Amino acid sequence: MADLEALAQAVINGDRDEVVRLAQEAVDEGVAPESIVNDGMIVGMDEVGRRFKANEFYVPEVLIAARAMHGGMDIVKPLLAESGVEPRGSVLIGTVQGDLHDIGKNLVAMMLEGGGFEVIDLGVDISADQFVEAIGEHSPNVVAMSALLTTTMPGMKDTIDVLDTAGIRDQVRVIIGGAPVTQDYADEIGADGYAPDAASAVDLTADLLNSS
Ligand code: B1M
């Protein structure tokens, strides 16, 4: 019988083969795809996020767990599309202009996907105009920006300013993060939120969408 608890544990263990096997077993037994995701894999990723916040897990464990979850999602995603299950919301993410650091941004993107959000990842070195263009194309609920350099952080303010000028600031929630970024900086530039780490970014996104 499909064991969603074991599936969650396999995600926590970062055991991709086991996640794929258990997800396929659940599909074959007719378990609803949303249940495989919500009661299995997301439960596992939530625990990974909790351990990461508590410094019980470090970056490699989170990346390995996210990779395992991706393996399971590859099996379930086509079925979710067929059954019309909506994601919790969509997030457009990118590292700001001039900045090539993407390890933290990728971690945030993976945790958001693990948390049931659709993620559109623009990559690195993304200008304000590219963010605006992508908002027009994808209509996300949230725009998440990452910066690792003090010299590129102003790109976050530039992007918010360009959203204002383009008259689309009210269409999206803007959240920011990255090693040099702080809550004070988020307040200063008029972002809607700041997350110090990937797990907090998931909580922040959920809170912002629940309150809108
Ligand atoms: Co760079 N680098 N680097 N680097 N690099 C730093 C950031 C630096 C602190 C190193 C140092 O001098 N001690 C320093 C910045 C100094 C400063 O600005 N104050 C620095 C520098 C100076 C540079 C170059 C200028 C070096 C040079 O060429 N002279 C250059 C710049 C290139 C560019 O971007 N234009 C450069 C280049 C590189 C590499 C290419 C070699 C490589 C990047 C590889 C890659 O990303 N693919 C690199 C790396 C690896 C680092 C360090 C060592 C590690 C960064 C990292 O990946 N951390 C870094 C020193 C350090 O931090 N110890 C350093 C792990 C990652 C999981 O953490 O990214 O903080 P982090 O993400 C966290 C949170 O911040 C948060 O969640 C993540 C997970 O918890 N978070 C978000 C991140 N984004 C978020 C977005 C959100 C929410 C949360 O949205 C809502």
Image (spheres, grey):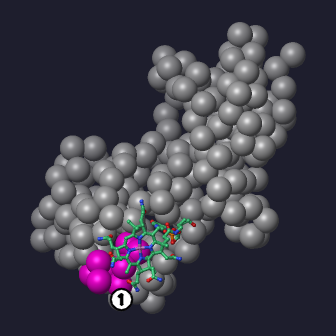
Query: Image point 75% across, 16% down: which residue?
Result: 25
- Find out whether residue 152 is within the magenta segment: yes
- Give the residue at mark 1: 188
Q: Residue 190, position in %: x, y?
A: 33, 80
The span picked out in magenta is: 147-154
The residue lying furthest to the right in this view is: 1
Query: Image point 50% across, 20% down: which residue?
Result: 78
Residue 105 visible at all = yes
Residue 27 figure quarter: top right
**Ligand 1 quarter of the rendering:** bottom left
Quadrant (top left/top right/bottom left/bottom right) for the C terminus:
bottom left
Query: Image point 84% across, 26% down: which residue?
Result: 3
For this rendering, which residue is in front, 17 or 50?
A: 17
Q: Residue 148, position in %: x, y?
A: 41, 74
Query: Would residue 107 appear left or right of 38 to someone viewing this image?
Result: left
Q: Is residue 41 above or below residue 136?
A: above
Query: Would residue 18 appear left or right of 140 to someone viewing this image?
Result: right
Query: Would residue 102 appear left or right of 59 to someone viewing this image?
Result: left
- Taken as a whole, is the magenta stretch helix, strand or loop? loop
Q: Secondary structure at mark 1?
A: helix
Residue type indicated by callout 1: Glu
